[in-house]
Amino acid sequence: MTARIPPVLRPEHPSARSLAGLVSEFGLEYTGSLDGVEITGVTLSTNDVQPGDLYVGIQGAHSHGASYAAQAREGGAVALLTDPAGAELAKDSGLPIVLVSSPREALGEISAWTYRTAEHPPLLFGTTGTNGKTSTSYLLEAILKQLGLVTGLSSTAERHIGDLTVVSRLTTPEASEMHALLARMRESNVRAVAIEVSAQALSRNRVDGITFDVVGFTNLSHDHLDDYADMEEYFAAKLPLFQQDRAGRGVVSLDTAWGQRVVEQSHIPVTTISTTPGVEAEWMATIVDEQAAYTEFTLTGPEGRSLTTRVPLIGWHMVANAGLAIVMLVEAGFELEAIGHALEAEGGINAYLPGRTERVSGQHGPSVYVDFGHSPDAFLNTLAAVRKFTPGRTIMVFGADGDRDATKRHEMGRVAADGSDILVITDHHPRFEDAASIRATLIEGAHLAEHQPELFEVSPPEQAIRTAVGMAREGDSILWAGPGHQDYRDIAGVRTPYSARDEARAALREAGWE
């Protein structure tokens, strides 16, 4: 069975816009007749075409989307937007063709016009960085709900519209999907939206046509060097979010040196936050109590303002994310005192973060955590957090993505080995790579560690978690890093249904634990 691809969320009652109006508004060239043609949606995929759509043909890695214009027409598309090369391919499709030099670069603004998302927008919060984007977005949404707002969320894990939840396709959806999502949120009276913004989203125009009220920067560490030549290029891909056409204000964490560089190169007003003693930031987040169920911290800022609250997660990095979320709200105009009162009423931030150091075990036996972390820095922070509440041994299970940044695999293995007593190396999404080869590279990295744990290579991951649970005793902790919230594995291009949470719970039951 192949895992179901999550749906694209669109407005249920779209308002039609004339194709002639689009051409006039943007001063575009066209072929064919525009008379009476009205569009109600925008899509890049023939699989997602709905009646009334403007189909957008973009040059892909293997083919040009305009080649499928006739198929799009059969699905109900009423017009095509493409470049001159695509227009030549689609000249016999029977669709009126609107011409632009770069369909991808035009997609955001045209989607915004089609769905009217610039008209009376909600409060928009965007978070970027290597790690912590998802957690900060969930924490933002949780606090906004506690403040009494109807909220929306777009993250790696899920999309939320009020109480409606669907699993995500991409960290940041394509611009056409993003504006459709915002339009659907407007129908549901959403007043504030937290959006996770990846570097790829900025490089590939996925948040074009959106102006955020406040944006946040978490950190930067080794990742995505399959998409970017080096760390400098990766860093440069984040910076456009801090430009005047993208956002009004920014909040930047100084917990990595890259944060100061964001401040220096930002073209919008920014405020700073840190959890690191001695760092000169306008806001400081300081841990005051750590328990297995929560971390309590105090946030202090300018003019003696302060707030003490709890985040229902372990680790200093989660305090960094929560502090960033709160300061982003302050920058959006919420009073710190009002935020404090709302959080105090519920004993802290009332958030559930799927697959983020998520404990899936019972009261007895080993503690088992499922986490989405897939970078060396994420491993380092999460292992440290788990170890702090582990009286026994720390056992780690992990694999690495295939067809993704291979340059980080040695460091992933090294950090995992240094932070664990027992290490089980297994598979994750091999995609079109050889899974055994990926594991071999991770094992090489583990052997570079100063500390050498007991090391096991176990494939597939269903057996790996059972091996880990079989070795675990009362007081031990197991961290299964990589799969987190995801409900599938990608093997040779096929999405196979799969849940790390379900597998971990089944392994515990089979071993005799609750």
Image: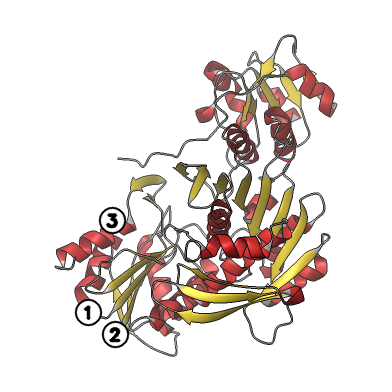
**Can see residue 262?**
no
Q: Secondary structure at mark 1?
A: loop
Image marks 3 and 2: residues in contact by CB distance under 8 Å: no
Q: Amino acid at mark 2?
A: Gly
- x then y, percent, for residue 272: 73, 71
Q: Amino acid at mark 1?
A: Glu
Give the residue number, with chain letter if any, for mark 3. 502
Instruction: For mark 3, give the secondary structure.
Output: helix
Quote the CA–CA distance across marks 1 and 2.
Answer: 8 Å
Classify mark 2: helix, strand or loop.
loop
For the residues labelled 1 and 2, say whether their Cβ atoms are less than 8 Å apart: yes
Of 76 and 372, the residue lying toward us:
372
Residue 501 is at least partly visible in this image: yes
Amino acid type, label 3: Asp
Q: Which mark is residue 109?
A: none
Q: Is residue 95 left or right of residue 514?
A: right
Circle 1 crowding by C-alpha within 10 Å: few under 14, some 14–19, many from 20? some
- Between residue 44 and residue 382, name the one nearer to us: 382
The image's colour scheme reads secondary structure
Q: Which mark is residue 392?
A: 2
Residue shown at 73%/17% (left/top)?
A: 18
Q: Would you name the residue on which mark 1 appears?
A: 474
Classify 10 Å Cα crowding around label 2: few (below 14), some (14-19), many (20 and above): some
Residue 34 rendering spot, x and y as whole percentages: 75, 13
User: Splitting the image into 4 quarters, where does residue 383 fall?
Assistant: bottom left
Q: Earlier in the sequence, mark 1 or mark 2?
A: 2
Q: Would you identify the image quadrant in which residue 239 lies?
A: bottom right
Q: Earlier in the sequence, mark 1 or mark 3?
A: 1
| Of the pair 176 and 244, the residue shown nearer to us | 244
